[in-house]
């Protein structure tokens, strides 16, 4: 039986801290912050050296040397093994990211404390909703790029008291976190006797230690249920103002489902996304859309505010980013609900031309529009990213993509391919068979149809050879799909 390894992150708030514990935690955060940026500065020459190396194997060898250098840097620090490892991995990730971006032609600068600028709340949300190791690691790396006014999170990679963390139950249903924060000889070290239930094993856990703190957690049934059904793997302690949050990554196994239907998603104008559900004969069993009117109106307001504020040297970006990020989460949730209902394979149009991130640029000659610019602030890349881990959480495979070319002008009933079929922005009427439908619905029908087509012919295609005319979508569907 095939399963997906799904990771979900649960957020616990640490409450009722004594002044002593709060003081020790704050000091640890500050020390870890200073150590991270000090180590980062000491590795700048290593990064510049790696930029001069063309051979990938040699650069990989240099990355091993970098890790050894970092180990020597953090060895004398008054931290636990967990936090030393966190500094090493964090600095190494930043250095290698800088090298990779620079070598790929991006205008990257070596990271410093003052350079960090990123959407913390977005990556916090990604971490909470992540369902696989790759997504979790990416979110954690991005969260580590803390702004100067925020302190970097403290990371715990292992589930044990000697060099990691544990989540424990005191027997009365109250949860506590043990965090390994310093060495046994540190002046903050105090003897601690633990006699609680390990939430990961359900067994009694008895231990004497002086290398960390036992912290009370505030949580609801959702978090408790998550710990009960999965296995806590890693944790990250985050400080925001006077509040502390422990982000615990929990591993689950979800049974993989075999999709029975195909769910095609098309981007629209009035509707931010339109969908159709088709079976493998082509029959449309459901269709619908999600409105984009509010998003467009919000965009106009934000752009006007941005324009006005720039006149006095201000920037107004966060409101737009927060709004659209939240919208993409809601949209992805709605798509997954439909996919879950029908056990459907999600198919979206190829997003290559509208993703806007350091590794993606619009291809020369690619069409662009107001709506594309509005949603290109990484939002469609984020939608694709969100869909992947949310679909896995319900046992469905990641979304597939197909080329969008022709989907809005091809008749899904007879296969007639003609620009004249698109009467207006919203109306489609076939010049041959008079099939009439909303243009965005037609796009979604054809996106699903293109995937059905490819699945049917992929074993018949010859690598390096052009696709035969009878296999091209508008020709193939005439004889193989019926609405």
Image (spheres, rainbow, N blue to C red):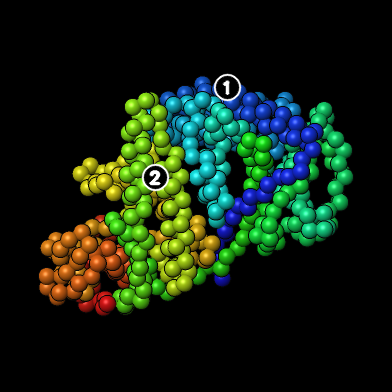
**Residue 411 vs residue 12: left or right?**
left
Q: Nearer the viewer, mark 2 or mark 1?
A: 2
Local crowd size for mark 2, using a 10 Å CA cut-off: few (<14), some (14–19), many (≥20)? some
Please identify the quarter of the rendering in which residue 89 is found.
top right
- Up-down: is 311 above or below 455? above
Which residue is rendered at x = 43% and y = 58% of the image? 331
Mark carried by residue 42 = 1
Q: Position of residue 155 (x, y in %)?
A: 65, 40
On the question of residue 134 being in view, the answer is no
Mark carried by residue 378 = 2
Q: Where is residue 424 in the image (x, y as percent from the top left)?
A: 17, 61
Q: In which quarter of the image is the C terminus?
A: bottom left
**Residue 442 vs residue 394: left or right?**
left
Local crowd size for mark 1, using a 10 Å CA cut-off: few (<14), some (14–19), many (≥20)? some
Task: Tell me which label, 2 or 1, sits earlier in the chain.
Answer: 1
- Up-down: is 421 above or below 300? below
CA gap between label 2 and label 1 equals 33 Å
Which residue is rendered at x = 82% and y = 58% of the image? 172
Local secondary structure at mark 1: helix
Which residue is rendered at x = 49% and y = 40% of the image? 119
């Amino acid at each position: 039986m095939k399963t997906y390894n799904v990771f979900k992150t649960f957020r616990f708030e640490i409450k009722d801290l004594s002044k002593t514990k709060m003081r020790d935690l704050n000091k640890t955060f500050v020390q870890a912050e200073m150590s991270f940026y000090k180590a980062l500065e000491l590795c700048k020459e290593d990064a510049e050296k790696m930029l001069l190396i063309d051979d990938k194997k040699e650069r990989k060898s240099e990355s091993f040397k970098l890790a050894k250098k970092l180990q020597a840097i953090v060895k004398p620090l008054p931290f636990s093994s967990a936090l030393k490892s966190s500094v090493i991995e964090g600095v190494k990730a930043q250095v290698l990211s800088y090298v990779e971006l620079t070598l790929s032609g991006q205008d990257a600068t070596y990271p410093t404390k003052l350079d960090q600028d990123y959407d913390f709340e977005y990556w916090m949300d990604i971490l909470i909703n992540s369902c696989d190791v790759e997504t979790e690691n990416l979110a954690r790396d991005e969260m580590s790029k803390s702004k100067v006014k925020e302190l970097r999170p403290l990371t715990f990679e292992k589930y044990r008291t000697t060099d990691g963390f544990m989540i424990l139950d005191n027997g009365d249903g109250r949860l506590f976190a043990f965090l390994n924060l310093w060495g046994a000889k540190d002046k903050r070290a105090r003897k601690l006797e633990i006699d609680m239930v390990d939430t990961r094993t359900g067994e009694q856990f008895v231990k004497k230690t002086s290398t960390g703190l036992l912290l009370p957690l505030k949580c609801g049934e959702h978090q408790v249920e998550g710990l009960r059904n999965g296995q806590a793997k890693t944790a990250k302690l985050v400080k925001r103002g006077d509040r502390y949050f422990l982000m615990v990554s929990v591993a689950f196994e979800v049974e993989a489902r075999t999709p029975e239907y195909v769910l095609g998603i098309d981007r629209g104008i009035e509707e931010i996304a339109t969908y159709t559900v088709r079976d493998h004969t082509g029959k449309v069993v459901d269709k619908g859309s999600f409105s984009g009117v509010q998003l467009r109106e919000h965009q106009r307001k934000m752009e006007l505010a941005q324009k006005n504020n720039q006149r006095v040297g201000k920037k107004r970006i966060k409101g737009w980013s927060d709004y659209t990020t939240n919208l993409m989460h809601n949209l992805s949730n709605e798509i997954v609900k439909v996919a879950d209902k029908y056990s459907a394979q999600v198919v979206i149009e190829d997003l290559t031309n509208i993703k806007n991130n350091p590794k993606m640029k619009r291809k020369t000659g690619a069409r662009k529009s107001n709506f594309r610019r509005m949603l290109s602030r990484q939002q469609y890349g984020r939608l694709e990213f969100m869909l992947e881990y949310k679909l896995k959480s319900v046992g469905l495979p990641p979304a597939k993509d197909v080329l969008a070319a022709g989907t809005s002008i091809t008749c899904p009933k007879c296969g007639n391919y003609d620009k004249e079929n698109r009467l207006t922005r919203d109306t489609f009427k076939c010049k041959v068979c008079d099939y009439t439908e909303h243009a965005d619905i037609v796009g979604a029908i054809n996106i699903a149809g293109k995937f059905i087509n490819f699945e049917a012919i992929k074993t018949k295609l010859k690598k390096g050879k052009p696709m035969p005319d009878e296999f091209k979508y508008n020709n193939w569907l005439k004889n193989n799909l019926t609405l």
